[in-house]
Image (spheres, rainbow, N blue to C red):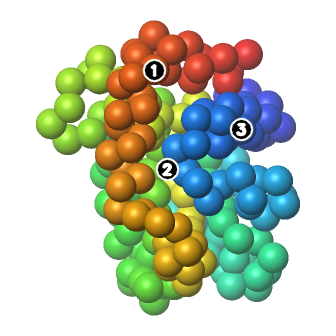
């Protein structure tokens, strides 16, 4: 497993060059520029320690209102996308069972992200592909406020799909690969 500092640097590069650089998330730039994103590299390979880390992030977000969002990065776990989806389902159950539903929500990113019904080589999959498996914890209230101030937020996913396809598979693949150098 790469050192945590390297994993975080690669994740930041992905955010700046792909997520922000391609405008996939119109809300990310402000939080990135103002250092309001927390990066947690999770070493544990077992679900128990991973879910404990998730709960710890919820508590940390509760205590630190200056921390807008957290990225839980799993460089040595969830390499298989189907295993990742199982872990994400468990993480959402933990979120609900711990009483954090409507307070936080999880967004998902994975190096092999594949939208349901999509083919492997569809460039649109790269809208959710990241250097490492990631659970992104978002504050519901902040998300709702951001969506209210953004024109036609329901069009963001379709716009991202169209952009990724227009850029093409090779550009999207190379952009992601460049984050690991």
Depth order, front residue of 109/92: 109
Which residue does the image show at 69% across and 47% down from the upper left?
41
Marked residue nearer the N-terminal end (2 or 3): 3
Position of residue 123 relative to residue 38, above or below, is above
Which residue does the image show at 72% across and 76% down from the upper left?
60
* Distance Cα–Cα, label 1 vs label 3: 17 Å
x, y percent for residue 62: 69, 84
Question: Is disc 3 placed on a helix, strand or loop?
Answer: helix
Residue under circle 2?
Answer: 46
* Distance Cα–Cα, label 2 vs label 1: 37 Å
Q: Quadrant of the N terminus?
A: top right
Which residue does the image show at 71% across and 71% down from the upper left?
68
Depth order, front residue of 34/136: 34
x, y percent for residue 21: 65, 35
Marks 2,1: beta carbons within 8 A: no
Circle on res. 29: none
Circle on res. 16: 3
């Amino acid at each position: 497993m790469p050192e945590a500092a390297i994993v975080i640097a690669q994740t930041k590069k992905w955010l700046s060059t792909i997520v922000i650089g391609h405008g996939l998330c119109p809300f990310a730039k402000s939080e990135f520029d103002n250092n309001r994103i927390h990066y947690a590299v999770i070493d544990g390979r077992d679900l128990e320690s991973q879910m404990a880390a998730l709960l710890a992030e919820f508590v940390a977000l509760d205590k630190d209102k200056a921390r807008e969002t957290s990225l839980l990065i799993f460089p040595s776990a969830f390499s298989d996308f189907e295993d990742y989806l199982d872990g994400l389902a468990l993480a959402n159950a933990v979120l609900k069972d711990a009483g954090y539903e409507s307070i936080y929500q999880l967004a998902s990113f994975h190096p092999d992200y594949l939208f349901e019904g999509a083919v492997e080589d569809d460039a649109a999959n790269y809208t959710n592909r990241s250097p490492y498996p990631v659970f992104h914890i978002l504050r519901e209230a902040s998300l709702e406020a951001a969506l209210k101030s953004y024109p036609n937020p329901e069009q963001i996913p379709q716009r991202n799909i169209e952009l990724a396809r227009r850029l093409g598979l090779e550009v999207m693949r190379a952009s992601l690969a460049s984050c690991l150098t």
